[in-house]
Image (cartoon, rainbow, N blue to C red):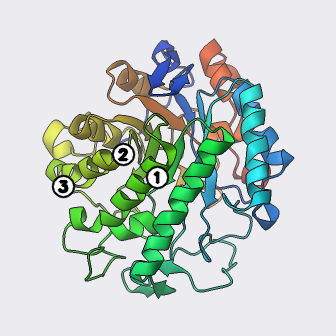
């Protein structure tokens, strides 16, 4: 039987969520992160004032750290939907400068999520103007799409990630996050189901297939300097296969994540479909550490947990039109008090209600909103 959260409309004392957090140059007023969520509201890849205002509303309402929607690097086919914003080019970067200045004026802290969608397909049917690129021209097992990257393509892509990160620092962002999860480009190198290469970027082991990610991380670290925190989002599951697991044991997870920390990652953003589920229940039981908990234990790095926080239904169901109602945060608070992980990212609850964090802080749980997938079609 699938384990669920505590379906209660109220929560225990949430003080553990509102302790300050400090790492290198980053100081946060609380432990709550706005999760990165694709919105596709950037015509021509340019973020407008509506996007700046969308993030400002969260900064004004106590969100500790805002992570932007995925923003793509300067590669010919780095996005799979037309409305995904660029993080390159003068006009797009001017738009992002307005976003971060607006967030800072509201007292917030923010980082862009830097992204390449690889061989994944968007939901709208839109396709890039040139063939998509990926490790082996595969979206997943038995699913060809686009072309395999040459070593020159890989080198240029590493450089493009570093350039975007350098621009983030120049514009005044507080952190940088790399998207290495959910079956997108970096994750397609990790996953044997999409990486069939026989050169140095492939291999039988997860550690071997992590070479591309390690090169990206190292290049980004050089670009942003030693003091700007670098976050890497990772996941076991893929949109191509919800049951996929990259690391089936703690030793495999160590081989995967420790070299990435050594390359320059400060924080692992560990994405689960349901944050309360144990990563290795065969070792520490049904109440055991989740993905972020194990990543922190094995690497010593700070971690962010995420996955269906504060709502009754998981986020994937939202794309099928399923509504969700608020649930209590008892389990989350217990894990935060135990310091299982350092930060918690909240997605749909904040997407649909800019005031969610303030309501949790003040105990105004009766006014928490249901999540309606219709809110995906607007910037609330």
Q: Residue at x 32, y 28 (%)?
A: 340
Q: Earlier in the sequence, mark 2 or mark 1?
A: 1
Left/right placement of residue 196 relative to residue 203 reads right
Cα distance in 3D space between marks 3 and 2:
19 Å
Residue 191, horizontal then vertical, whole percent: 33, 68
Say which residue appears at 53% left-offset and 44% top-offset: 176
Secondary element at image label 3:
helix
Which residue corresponds to the image point at 32% horizontal and 50% vertical from the top-left?
A: 263
For residue 160, side relative to residue 86 (left or right): left
Q: Position of residue 127 (x, y in %)?
A: 66, 80
Can residue 52 be seen at all in this image of the molecule? yes
User: Where residue 341 appears, x then y in whole percent?
Assistant: 36, 31
Query: Looking at the image, which is closer to me, 124 or 374?
Result: 124
Graded by Cα atoms within 10 Å as few (under 14), some (14 to 19) or many (20 or more), the crowding at tag 2 reads: many
Q: Which residue is mark 1?
A: 220
Q: Which mark is residue 264?
A: 2
* Circles 2, 1 touching at the beta carbon (< 8 Å): yes
Closer to viewer: mark 3 or mark 2: 2
Q: Quadrant of the C terminus?
A: top right
Contact (Cβ within 8 Å) of mark 3 with mark 1? no
The mark that comes first in sequence, 3 or 2, is 3
- Numbered mark located on residue 9 in the image: none
Q: CA distance from mark 2 to mark 1?
A: 8 Å
* Camera-nearest residue between 46 and 50: 46
Front position among marks 3 and 1: 1
Q: Quarter of the image holding residue 53? A: top right
For label 3, the residue is 252
Vertical placement of residue 331 versus 259, above or below: above
Horizontally, residue 194 falls left or right of residue 103, namely left
| Camera sees residue 324 | no
Image: 36 above or below 205: above
């Amino acid at each position: 039987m699938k384990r669920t959260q505590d379906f209660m409309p109220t929560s225990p004392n949430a003080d553990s969520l509102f302790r300050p957090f400090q790492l290198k140059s980053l100081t946060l007023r609380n432990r709550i992160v706005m999760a990165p969520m694709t919105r596709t509201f950037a015509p021509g890849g340019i973020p407008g004032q509506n996007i700046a205002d969308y993030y400002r509303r969260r900064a004004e309402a106590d969100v500790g750290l805002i992570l932007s929607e995925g923003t793509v690097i300067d590669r010919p086919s780095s996005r799979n939907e037309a409305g995904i914003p660029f993080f390159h080019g003068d006009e797009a970067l001017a738009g992002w400068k307005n976003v971060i200045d607006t967030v800072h004026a509201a007292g917030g802290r923010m980082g862009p999520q830097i992204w390449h969608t690889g061989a994944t397909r968007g939901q709208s049917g839109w396709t890039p103007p040139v063939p998509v690129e990926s490790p082996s021209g595969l979206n997943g097992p038995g699913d060809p799409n686009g072309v395999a990257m040459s070593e020159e393509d890989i080198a240029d892509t590493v450089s493009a990630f570093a350039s975007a990160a350098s621009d983030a620092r120049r514009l005044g962002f507080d952190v940088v996050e790399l998207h290495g999860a959910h079956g997108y480009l970096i994750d397609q190198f990790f996953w044997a189901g999409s990486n069939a290469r026989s050169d140095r970027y492939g291999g039988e082991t997860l550690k071997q297939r992590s070479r591309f990610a390690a090169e990206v991380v190292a290049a980004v670290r050089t670009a942003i300097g030693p003091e700007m925190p670098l976050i890497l989002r990772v996941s076991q599951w893929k949109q191509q296969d919800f049951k996929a697991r990259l690391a089936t044991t703690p030793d495999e997870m160590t081989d995967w994540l420790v070299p990435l920390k050594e390359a320059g990652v400060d924080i692992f953003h560990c994405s689960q479909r349901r944050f309360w589920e144990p990563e290795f229940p065969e070792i520490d039981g049904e109440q055991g550490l989740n993905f972020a908990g194990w990543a922190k234990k094995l690497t010593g790095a700070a971690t962010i947990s995420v996955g269906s926080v504060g709502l009754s239904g998981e986020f994937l169901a939202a794309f099928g039109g399923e509504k969700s109602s608020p649930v209590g945060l008892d389990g989350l608070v217990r894990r935060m008090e135990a310091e299982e992980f350092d930060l918690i990212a909240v997605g749909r609850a904040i997407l649909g209600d800019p005031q969610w964090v303030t309501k949790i802080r003040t105990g105004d749980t009766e006014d928490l909103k249901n999540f309606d997938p219709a809110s995906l079609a607007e910037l609330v």
